[in-house]
Image: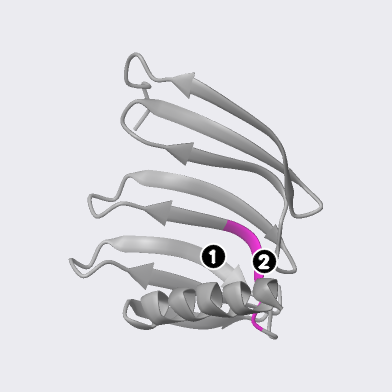
Amino acid sequence: MKKSILFSIAFLFTVVSFAQQERELKLNKNTNLIDVVYYHDNGAVSQTGAYTTDGKLQGEWLSFNTEGKKQVSANYDNGNKVGKWFYWNKTTLKEVDYTNNTIANVSEWEIKSPVATSN
């Protein structure tokens, strides 16, 4: 019973926080998924991802800060957390491995210098 109440509260908090963000939704006829882009108040992309037609998160989801820098790369399968998730901040990169919607392993690295990228 307590788990159900906690889940309901967490779900409502998520829905309310997303409901306040501007978003674009588009049905992808090739995948039969609903592609979505959420935006920060400043117009920068906040999150990208997809939902199943019954509202479950599916595939890769990316989250960005207000400056457009990637903060999270996550993967879902029919609403369940799967595979490797990555969390970046100014000083660390954290990798979280999910198996059966449960954390299986966590690794963390300190970022000592910026990563070079090609244009």
The image position of residue 24, as x and y in percent, is: 41, 79
Compare residues 55 and 49 and report the one nearer the observer. 55
Q: Residue at x 52, y 72 (%)?
A: 10
Choose the circle earlier in sequence order: 1 or 2: 1
The residue that disc 2 covers is 58
The span picked out in magenta is 55-60
Residue 60 seen in the figure? yes
The image position of residue 109, as x and y in percent, is: 49, 20
Q: Residue furthest front?
A: 2
Q: Secondary structure at mark 2?
A: strand
Q: In the picture shown, does residue 116 fall above or below 54?
A: above
Which of the labelled discs sits on residue 5, or is there none? none
Q: Residue furthest left?
A: 42
Name the residue type under label 2: Gln
The residue that disc 1 covers is 49
> Label 2 crowding class (10 Å Cα cut-off): few <14, some 14-19, many 20+?
many
Prevailing secondary structure class for the magenta stretch in the rendered image: strand
| Image-quadrant location for residue 113 | top left
Assess whether mark 2 and mark 1 are in contact (beta carbons under 8 angstroms).
yes
The image position of residue 91, as x and y in percent, is: 34, 25
Q: For this view, does 66 lie left or right of residue 112? A: left
Q: Residue at x 26, y 61 (%)?
A: 44
The image position of residue 49, as x and y in percent, is: 54, 65
Q: For this view, does 86 lie left or right of residue 68? A: right
Name the residue type under label 1: Gly
Q: Is residue 113 magenta?
A: no
Residue 30 seen in the figure? no
